[in-house]
Image (spheres, helix red, strand yellow):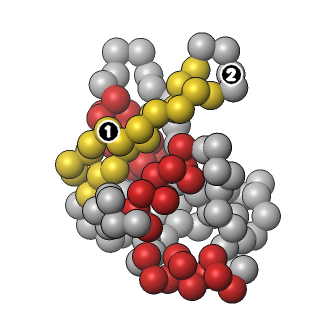
Amino acid sequence: HNVAWEPHRLSLVAGFVDAGESLEACVRREVFEEVGVELAQVRYVASQPWPFPRSLMLGFVARAVSPAIRVDGVEIDRAEFVSRADYDARLGDGRLGMPTSASIAATLIGLWRSGELPC
C-alpha cells in the first residue's frame, strides 16, 4: 500500500530498470528495496504500454525466499502476502479495490486468481 493511496487500494510492487541491469535483477532489487522480500525464480509474464514517453510496463512472477516483509514506512506503509481466498473475500466485501482493468497489475492479479500463475 502506497502512503498516498486511499486505504483499501493495494497493488503490486513496481519500479524502474537501471542502466546495465537485467530485468530479473531489477525485479529482485525493486521488491527488496520496497518491501524487503528476497526473490527466487523470477519469470516474465506480460507487458503493456505505459503513458510516459517511450515507456513499457513489464510483469513478472517470482517466489519469495522467505515470508518476512519490511516496508520503509515512507513510500510504502504496509505490504502482505494474501491467499486467493482472502483476496476474493476482501474484494467481495469492499475491503479491497481491484486495480483498473487496463493495468499490468490487474492482468497479473487476474492470472493469479484464475490459477494460471503460481501463488
Judge by depth and name the residue closer to the eye, 19 or 117.
Answer: 117
Pointer 2 with pointer 1, Cβ within 8 A: no
Amino acid type indicated by mark 1: Tyr
The residue singled out by tag 2 in the image is 52
Alpha carbon of mark 2 to alpha carbon of mark 1: how far? 21 Å
Residue at 57 percent of width and 85 percent of height:
89
x then y, percent, for residue 43: 27, 43
Q: Would you call the spot at circle 2 few (<14 residues within 10 Å), some (14-19), or many (20 or more)?
A: few
Tell me the quarter of the image containing the C terminus: bottom left
The residue singled out by tag 1 in the image is 44
- Give the answer, above or below, for where 108 lies relative to 6: above
Left of 103 or right of it: where is 86? left
Residue at 52 percent of width and 76 percent of height:
87
Tell me the quarter of the image containing the N terminus: bottom right
Residue at 44 percent of width and 22 percent of height:
18
Can residue 40 be seen here? The reply is yes
Residue at 49 percent of width and 59 percent of height:
110
* N-term mark: 2 or 1: 1
Can residue 74 be seen here? The reply is no
